[in-house]
Amino acid sequence: MFRLPHLLVLFATGVLVWGLVLAARRAGRERVQGWLKVCAVLALLFDPVYWMWEMGQFGQIHPETTLPFYLCSLFWMMLPLAVFSRQEKLRQIAAANVCTMGVMGGMLGLVFNVYLNHYPFFHFVPVRSLLYHILMIAAAVLLWAGGVYRPKPRDRVLCFAPVAALVGVSLVLNRLFGWDYCYTAGGIGTPLEAMSRIMPRWAFLFVLYGGLWLVIQALFYRRFYTGETGKFELRSKSLALAGLLRR
């Protein structure tokens, strides 16, 4: 991580984000929705492509690491719902998740991409991972800057509903097989492993997900706590070079 190619990717992503903000503002909501449909279709391809690669390399899929139970897996599940679902409530929940957990996961996965510590930069595994996380960021930017996602007070809780469901499934898998999806085994091999070693597992998960929820409230939904009026604004604290996203 943080070698020249990685740093160039981070810089290019910042430029991309800035360009998407400007383009989305000029294009209008309907056109942005078309771009998001393309993003949603692309997002669905990343896991099947990886499964095909793993089958070709190892002759099998490793269920302990390959199944779509990562936090970032929510992106390719939620974005199609946010774009194509005909149920308004489901669209709103999915968009809220992509615009909060999705953009945070995209940024963290792009910056702290652990695959770069184990594979050459141009290997299939890190390239796929980097592109996926860039797509996570890009889709969230389009949802925010294009005015497609319009936050509501109830989103403060509902944006986390898909996370709670996925963590619940991951806890069952951890109990049955000891797998580490959603960091339920302590985030083995990730920067979170050090924190999980110094506290009970239940406390680690409470601090991790409680902290994530609080960060989301501070970054994305502060307006609903402070009683501000006028248009919703999201400052660039959450999107490094995106500038001020507003509708």
Image: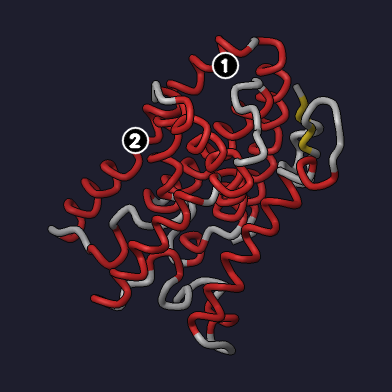
* Between 134 and 69, the one nearer to me in the picture: 69
Displayed quadrant of residue 78: top left
User: Relative to 240, is 15 above or below?
Assistant: above
Q: In the rendering, which numbered label is found on residue 92?
A: none
- Image coordinates of residue 245 in percent, x first then y, are 76, 30
Residue drawn at (76%, 42%) of the image: 224
Residue drawn at (57%, 16%) of the image: 32
Displayed quadrant of residue 109: bottom right
Amino acid type shown at disc 2 = Leu
Q: Which residue is mark 2?
A: 44
Describe residue 238's horizontal placement relative to residue 195 as left or right: right
Q: In the rendering, which numbered label is found on residue 32?
A: 1
Taking the image as drawn, is residue 5 in sight?
no
- Image coordinates of residue 98 in percent, x first then y, are 53, 40
Q: Secondary structure at mark 2?
A: loop
Q: Earlier in the sequence, mark 2 or mark 1?
A: 1
Q: Using a 10 Å C-alpha cutoff, classify the residue at mark 2 as few (fewer than 14 neighbours), some (14 to 19) or many (20 or more).
A: some
User: Relative to 150, is 46 above or below?
Assistant: below
Describe residue 186's horizontal placement relative to residue 124 as left or right: right
Q: Secondary structure at mark 1?
A: helix
* Between 110 and 121, the one nearer to me in the picture: 110
Q: Using a 10 Å C-alpha cutoff, classify the residue at mark 1 as few (fewer than 14 neighbours), some (14 to 19) or many (20 or more).
A: many
Residue drawn at (31%, 64%) of the image: 65
- Image coordinates of residue 217 in percent, x first then y, are 70, 51
Q: Outermost residue toward the left?
A: 59
Residue drawn at (39%, 25%) of the image: 85
Amino acid type shown at disc 1 = Val
Image quarter where the N terminus lies is bottom right
